[in-house]
Structures are given as C-alpha cells and as structure tokens.
Amino acid sequence: EAQVTQNPRYLITVTGKKLTVTCSQNMNHEYMSWYRQDPGLGLRQIYYSMNVEVTDKGDVPEGYKVSRKEKRNFPLILESPSPNQTSLYFCASRTHPGLAYEQYFGPGTRLTVT
Amino acid sequence: AQTVTQSQPEMSVQEAETVTLSCTYDTSESNYYLFWYKQPPSRQMILVIRQEAYKQQNATENRFSVNFQKAAKSFSLKISDSQLGDTAMYFCAFRHGGSQGNLIFGKGTKLSVKP
C-alpha cells in the first residue's frame, strides 16, 4: 500500500529536550516536505526536499532542522523545542515533475512542548 | 507572494442539500494548480479535487465540483447531496507550476453537515 508514515503519532515533551519525528514514504517520491498546522492558520511549510541531500527552507523554518540521506526518509529535528512549537505536524511527498500530481500526506504527529 | 483566502471559517448544511465553500487566491503566475483538501476528525489530509489553471473546464469528482474563475482568481467548491461523512475541515491550496512549488494553504473552512 502506497503510504507516508510518521512516528510518533503523539509526543509530549519538555522545553529544550531534543526530539526527532520520523517520516518515511514507500512510493519512490523525490519531493518531500514538512508542514505544521495551527488553529486558524492552516498548514504552513517548514522545510522541503527535492531529492537526496537537497533540502531548502519553507515559510516557517526557525527552530527546525531536516536531513535527507535516503530517498524514502525525511526526519524533522527539533534541537531545542519550545512551547511555540506545539502543533500538529504533517509530512508529505509527491513525485517530482511539476504537474498536478497529488501530494500524499502522512497521518500527522501531535506535538506538545511544556 | 501567493496567498490563499478562505473567507468562511465555519459553515453548516443540512444533509442532502448543496453547499459552496469559497476560496480566492492571489498570484501573478499563469501556470499553477489548485486543490481542495478535506480533513475529517481523524486529521488525515485527503485530496478532494484538483484543477489545472490552463484548463477552462471545471473539475468534477462525483458529488464534488469546482467553479474556477481564473480572471477573478476564485476557486469555490460545491458539494452536492451533502452527507454526514462530509463533516470536516476543508482547505483550499495553491501550487505554482514549477517542480519546486510547495502547497500554500488557506486557513480552512469547518463544515458541519446536520441530519
């Protein structure tokens, strides 16, 4: 089954404790990205990756890091989480060419930073 | 910069009736794509319908159809014969035509279908 998986689905942590949210896709997609969803703000892109070892900032990259060492994986790293990073996070992927290809979303990760 | 505006934070409709969700966008580009995503209480993002800007014909998917007005930069979603399972947040999204294009989302419309 074609899918994007994220782990963990729920995470409660404390300020400053480094964490990683994993993302993996099994569709051989080149393009992957991370979004955060906050009430009243919709989804905003954090980082994206065009392919292995190619990453770039989205609209709200502050406080986040990413890496793309393998095509299928695109982890999101919070080196020193803060309460304003409490949010719902989505990983997404799509194939490369710029047509209207569907972007597949993971199930979401609910992060709470206290 | 591209922006997407959904002016209706919440809407409700009776089961079996028709409802239209509004979306406007701002761009100077001519090659782009528009999408409607549904997010039910499970939080999963589900693609409802997509529209290529170069196509004049409005996209349809079963009970879902769009009214794409390119000159007015408007992209509304019509849901016919509303069902209880249509209750969800609906997000309008824009992506320009380049391969690097990321999705730009509106703030969403919460739709409630009442029995």
Image (tube, coloured by chain):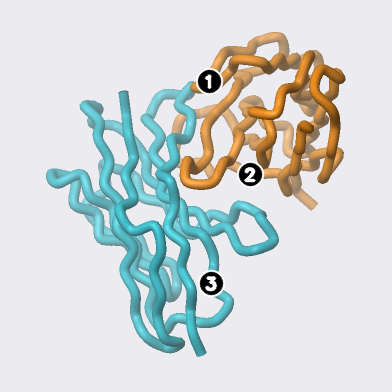
Q: Position of residue B20 (x, y in %)?
A: 31, 68
**Secondary structure beneath disc 2?**
strand
The residue beneath circle 1 is A58
Q: Position of residue B95 (x, y in %)?
A: 41, 34
> Which residue is depicted at the point 26% across and 47% down?
B24
Q: Nearer the viewer, residue A25 or B91?
A: B91
Q: Name above or below for residue B33 compared with residue A63.
A: below
Quadrant for residue B94, please give it.
top left
Q: Position of residue A47 (x, y in %)?
A: 60, 21
| Circle 2 chain | A
Q: Residues at badges 2 and 3 in contact (C-beta under 8 Å)?
A: no
The residue beneath circle 3 is B87
Judging from the image, what is the letter of the chain drawn in cyan? B
> Which residue is depicted at the point 44% across and 81% down?
B82
Amino acid at pointer 2: Tyr
Rendered colour, chain A: orange
Q: Name above or below for residue B84 compared with residue A14.
A: below
- Does residue B83 appear left or right of residue B58 in this picture? right
Q: Nearer the viewer, mark 1 or mark 2?
A: 1
Residue B114 visible? The answer is yes
Q: Residues within 10 Å of mark 2 (few under 14, many from 20)?
A: many
Residue A99 — which label? none
**Secondary structure beneath disc 1?**
loop
Say if labels 1 and 3 share a chain: no
The residue beneath circle 2 is A104
> Which residue is depicted at the point 80% across and 52% down?
A1
Calculate the distance from the C-alpha at mark 1 to the C-alpha at mark 3. 30 Å
